[in-house]
Amino acid sequence: MSKRVKDLDSRLERLEGALTLANTGTFDIDVEVSDELDFDDPLTAVETGVYVLINDMGEQVMESRKRSQELQDKLNLIEKQRQAIEELSTPIIKIWDQVLVLPLIGTLDTRRSQKLTEALLTDISATQTKVTIIDITGVPNVDSAVANHLLKTVAAVQLLGASCVITGIRPEVAQTIVHLGVDLGGVETLSNLAEGLQWALNRLKYRILKEEGVQ
Amino acid sequence: MIVVRIKDVGDIIKARSAVKDVAEKLGFGIVDRTRISTAVSELARNIYLFAKEGDVQIEELSNPHKGIRITFIDHGPGIEDIDLALKDGWSSSNGMGKGLPGARRLVDLMEIESQPGKGTTVIIEKWLKG
């Protein structure tokens, strides 16, 4: 015995509409709880099922959108921090009259070394710097790309009429550079920053004298 | 086996530090660790420069040599002439031309397999001595 389904056409249309909306990502359908919910009507169960399902899906989608927004926020934060670190980790210090020190820390990629070179060159010409010390104690890896960046920076500094010395090449880095076959022969290098400063002062004809007879 | 996917510049650093960790665990000294990670830096950068993306696989070796093996796999343009690519100073990327030959000098074994248009696989090994 088949029961009569009330308003079949309009109800089917509504179902189809809800499904189409759900398909396009709209889940906010108003589930109409009719006063005269007729459970004998075979379509009622299907309708209720579909609407509840769509509602649940909507909630899940909202939840996952929220999550991905949170993730995106975190990624943005990381990017901001990376930029902050980048700026903080490339200070250019005027250590003496006409002497700049650039202590490099971490990894040098193309972008960072370009920014560095730019900042350094600007500072050199603004402060009439004669000697620049690039200290790479904090650079754990010097591969051919990093070496290339360093060589270019040194060349640019020299074009501005300043002399340049690289200090702080660690023993293991030195061995690696030699094995790589990178030629730093044209670049002045010294083992540490203290020697670099001494070298710089020598070039500028300063003499540091220890006072005699003072305890 | 550890796999690091190379997709952007930062992944080169990831691969390098993963390799460093494994090498340290295996008992490599600071000089060899620096050699290995510099070689990884060169080869991972090659993936990024030429193939845009690829994988770096890191594994332990026990027989016949104790050590570390790192495999670089990409499906990029491949290398036309491997002998030429291994020549010091030759570069197809406006670099110093020290990448491949330099990396080879830093490790105990390097094998390159490449098919133009299909991709490149580079295997390097560093052995623990004594």
Image: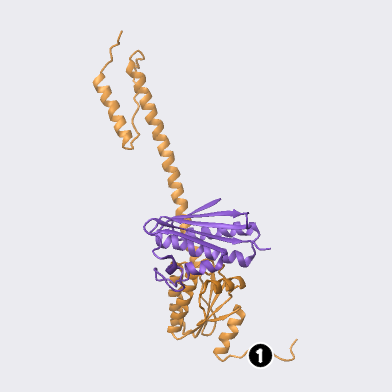
Q: Secondary structure at mark 1?
A: loop
A211 w.r.t. A124: above or below: below
* Colour displayed for chain A in the image of the structure: orange
| Chain where mark 1 sits | A
Which chain is drawn using purple? Answer: B
Amino acid type of the residue tagged 1 in the rendering: Leu
Identify residue for label 1. Answer: A209
Quadrant showing the N terminus of chain A: top left
Number of on-image labels = 1
Query: Residue A109 appears at what percent x and percent y?
Result: 47, 66
Expressed as whole percent of the image width and height from the top left, the position of residue A12 reads 27, 23
Location of residue B116 by image quarter: bottom left
A191 in relation to B59, above or below: below
**Image location (x, y in percent) of residue A98:** 51, 85
Residue depicted at x 44% and y 60% = B47
- Residue B17 placed where, x, y %? 55, 59
| Viewer-side residue, B116 vs A193 | B116
The answer to whether one can see residue A33 in this image is: no
